[in-house]
Image (cartoon, coloured by chain):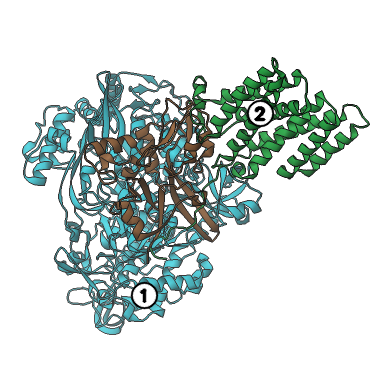
Chain colours: A green, B brown, C cyan
Amino acid sequence: MSLQTNWDARAALNFMCGGAGAGLMIASAVLGLPDASIALALALIACGLGAVWLELGKPLRALHVFFNPFTSWMARESFAAVLVFALGIGTFFMRELLPGAALAAALFLYCQARMLQGATGIPAWRTPGSVARLVSTGLAEGMGLALVFSASPLALSLFALAVIARAFANSEWFMTLAILALVALGAFVPYAAAVGGLVALAAGWHMKFTLVTRASHKQGFALPRLPVRGTR
Amino acid sequence: MTKWAIVADLRRCVGCQTCTAACKLANGTPPGVQWRRVLDLEAGEYPNVKRAFVPVGCMHCDDPPCMHVCPSTATRKRPDGIVTIDPDLCIGCAYCAVACPYDARFKVDGVATKCTFCVERIDAGLAKGQKPGVDPEATPVCVNSCIAGALHFGDAEDPGSNISQLLAEHRHFRLNEELGTGPNIHYLWDRLP
Amino acid sequence: MNPRVATYCYQCVAGPDLLTVEVSEKGGSRVACNIEPNFAAAEIHPAGGKVCVKAYGLVQKAYHPDRVLTPMKRTNPRKGHDEDPGFVPISWDEALGMVASKLNDIRARGLLDESGYPRVAASFGGGGTPQFYMGSFPAFLAAWGPIDMGFGSGQGVKCYHSEHLYGELWHRGFTVSPDTPLTNYLISCGANVEASGGVAGVKRHADARSRGMKRVQVEPHLSVTGACSAEWVPIKPKTDAAFLYALIHVMLHEEPRSKLDVEFLYRHTSSPYLVGSHGYYLRDPSHAQPIIAASLEAREEQLALEIGADGEVLGEGRLSGATAFSKLVEHMRPYTPEWAQAICDVPAGTIRRIAREYVDAACIGRTIEIEGKTLPYRPVAVSLGKTVTNGWGGYECCWARTLLAALVGALEVPGGILGTTVRLNRPMSERHKSVRAGPDGLMAYPFNPTGRETWSAQPNIRNAYRTMVPLAADGPWSQALGPTHFSWMFLDGTPPGLPRVTLPEVWILYRTNPAISFWDTAKLEERMARFPFVVAFAFTRDETNHYADVLLPDAGDLESLQLIRIGGSKYIEQFWDHEGFALRQPAIAPRGESRDFTDIATDLAGRTGLLDKYNAAINKGTLGVPLKDFALDASRPYGAAQIWDAVCKAASTELSGEAHGLDWWKEKGFATKPFPRTAWYLFPTLEQKGLRFEMPYQERLARIGAELKARLHEKDMHWWDKQLTEYQALPAWKDFPQEWIDHLVSAGGKEADYPFWLLTSRSMQYAWGGNVGMQLIKEVADNIAGHRGVIINTGRARSLGIAEDQWVDIATPQHNVRARAVLREGIRPDTLLLLGQFGHWATPVAKDFGMPSMNSLVPMSLALTDATGSGADLVRVSLRKAA
């Protein structure tokens, strides 16, 4: 008998890899990165989905995930993923599809964020800030990875912006300053900015892993009133 | 319309776990899976302490978050309010388990499970002309088993039903009501003056 | 729909619960798959036919993977905790042959040994509940002759011992209950009715709460019952007598007499009896009856006799005396709430308020009509729990509780306290018939004699109840109500005056596990290992049958036949509006080679040449009803179905005049007739017979104590002197907790090093049940705090650096147990609580709980034994984080 009442590392990997992959797909489109970058983005998303597929109790029924796009952000995420892969793979043959792939990736990222926020049972997830947190983190991870492929001023600027946005969404200032310092150091030391990008990736993944697997305490039960036992 | 609901009288509940055991035995749930269970809660500090026993489980919410998040439509809500899971549709993503604010869902051997309000008893009983909550054969086993007379089952939409009368005569609340899910286990805590 | 088979569950004394077992056909045989209430009994059962949580474990119990399913014999002749018994399966023929050969050898040599003790001993656990599962075995025991049933497995230390003995003396209350259907104000000192009162207790108290009853729970920890009460008073352990005395003080010295039921006291109690200067009643010289004063509180001079112990005339002529009530008033004067506060750690104001609430709720003067009879209505009660009603202080608490009822006329009347069953007086089936006129206008009581000529210096069994405990009487239950630890203790050295305590040559065990459930379990095991031949009817291996020579698997709860009496008035809250019989019948076939207990008993009777006596015992009524027209032919063996068919016919004839056989009962499951509610109350019977309740003054006990002292001293027996001090006409408060501290010091400990009181409390999920090895029960019980470890006050634990779930060591100077810490606010900082009785090391499933028991820490000691022969579940311990 197997029993599960919460999500584990496999689900966390979907948010980690999927978020970073989606961010990188968007960065690839904005910065015009090479096919390798697009391939990496797709690979990351695939890894995430693969991991969460392993979490499914009935993996052979994976297609059932598409049955409820009307209310389930998980179903919507699945449709977005199909789009990302269709358009993303298409870009290898028709580069013009890249903006579309990026839009699909943005949609995918948003769906992921809403998915977490939709988990009503978990106070740390269900806050409105979850969407900004997941989206900005995904973007920062993707832009950070993009620095491996391009150290253009635009790339650096977008990365810095994403990191700052992420800082606001996560109230995480020390790490942000460290990353920005690495970006600035990039003007003098080769690869320092890229290291900064990878640090942002690591920080994002750490946060999401913690959020999904550790900060997943359920709501619990608070009694608004205690019963009156006999007379008062 | 019918809306099945449970009324739990916290003044009467003694935490004996008879309902927990009866549910486990009748539904054959595996070790560690308790569709119905009774919490043992303390409030206050010594020596001003109160202790209460609170039966919990699936609340068959009016607006069930588990149903909304379910990607496969395995979780559905019947017109009579009962939230069901189709085990043949469920993919076992456990999204419903993290979406439920009442810790009521268990993914067992790949699919989500939870309290069914003993729906098959209700349906079979209704087919025989019995009244759920009144006729034991048509009533959830936890309610049947309750030795303290704390658990009651009935139609919340019928103003003349057993539970509607209890709700009309007592002060009551629902758990985590602020989440807006419209849970259908009501807790009595005092009589109305 | 699967068929349902009606049966009963009597795994605890708060039964029976009437239930149905759902069975399905599988591979041609029936499989039990579900347990449900028997709603057909809804109208006649006090809890609407509902079934307690323990019964839901019966399906797992039937199919327990570790069940003993064939007879087995021991192959390792060495017995010890660490010795593997090496049990191997044998045939029934070989197993019963071994047992019969031992028994026949004993019959050939004589049933008593050189000390005069029975060579055969038997222990049954669970407060008498095994008899509801042992079929016709009682008839075998009756046919056998003397058997020592005094090897305790929990009696005394785990029961309401003082309540049993004094309760029967004062109001035929072997167990005492509030008249819960009518009580409005209940002071509950440690009585945990929600855990121990069964479904009837739970339902009735829930109804009472809904009605608005106020229950004040006085207990060191916030038990389930405390949780369900209007108020929790966290009292210091073992000081309940001081609390109750202060309530009485307030009622006698601070409240006007009009708040008491003066008429009840004067007319229906011994309060107006004049007491002379030596403490004995002043008696009319012409007929030696006590002189009744003209008013409740008086001092009178009368022409009188004062007769002391052994008939000694202590005074004659014009003698001055005060009424028993006046003596009481003086006696209680020092016990003020302020005095009690210092002892109990309960504020004086709280005590005063509770006393006033109690008298105000007593409705003095009001009456109620029940079944056309007008009776006094006094809806106030005091209930007492384990550890309050046994060991030192038990007498004082029981006396105070009964007095609290008497003061407001709430004794055996609607709304007050009721004795719900008798076990020492006869007939056991009917309390009212046991009310017979005794001396001095009081009820007769079958004291063991203490006179010069009549005292029994030769005990009939090893625990010497007949010699040492006059109150234990000498009926079928008395053996279990003596000092049942003496049988164990004295194996290592019998005190002067008693014949040397010997090992029984054959010890028979059923549904009992003293190696877990008694006190000082390690020592008990050492002694058990010396028993030469132990026959254990076994469900699974356990800590006691670890020492057995033969294991016999009887067919289980859902597999065998028996008809029992139900309803009427029985233990605790089991007083019904109906009475009759219920059948336990095989819902499924016996598993493995297990056999119906009745067939085992018949087989054994045949092998030991006792068949005719055995059948005669059955015919006489040993199975609950005399067979009369349906009597068995004494000379031939019958199968279980034939025996119970005859019992069924006799029972239904008694019930309705129509004889219905086993098949009828199998279909119906139970049958009853109305039991008058007026029969719940003893007061009208006493009134009708012109008898008085023996309250408040205990002249008889004082006399008996003096006589017993004389007898013992005549035989140079001084080791019971401390216990003899309990025999006081008006019991004074003694520093009861200090007894345990003194014992600690004598065992080499310093009080400051052992600052905690370790207590236990019943668990509804396990109480009496013998269901410890059921996974289902463990799982659901774990939802209630304390089933996974020792409960410690949160603040106190933090100050000791102990966190939730951390392992801690709990120790006495001799022993140590390890438990996980469970931090709760609802317990006194000086108290620790270990629920239930665990600490298993052999019982399957339970041995993996990691949950210790206080029984391994509680010392078995003469110093901690009170005059009734009981101890208490209490011990001083240290607590520290485990290394």
Residue nearest the observer in this picture, C703 or C208 = C208
Residue nearest the observer in this picture, C852 or C778 = C778
Q: Say whether residue A96 is visible.
A: yes
Is residue C709 shown above or below C296?
above
For residue C632, which quarter of the picture?
A: top left
Tell me the amino acid under the disc marked 2.
Answer: Ala
Q: Quadrant of the C terminus of chain B?
A: bottom left
Residue C681: % across, % down:
22, 62
Q: CA distance from mark 2 to mark 1?
A: 90 Å
Front position among marks 2 and 1: 2
Give the structural element (helix, strand or loop) at label 1.
helix
Q: Tell me the subunit letter for badge 1.
A: C
Q: Are marks 2 and 1 in contact (CB under 8 Å)?
A: no
Give the structural element (helix, strand or loop) at label 2.
helix
> According to the image, label 2 marks what residue?
A105
Q: How packed is label 2: few (under 14 Cα within 10 Å), some, or many (20 or more)?
A: many
Residue C14: % across, % down:
31, 48
Q: Is residue C548 left or right of residue A136?
A: left
> According to the image, label 1 marks what residue?
C328
Tell me the amino acid under the disc marked 1.
Answer: Leu
Residue B120: % across, % down:
31, 34
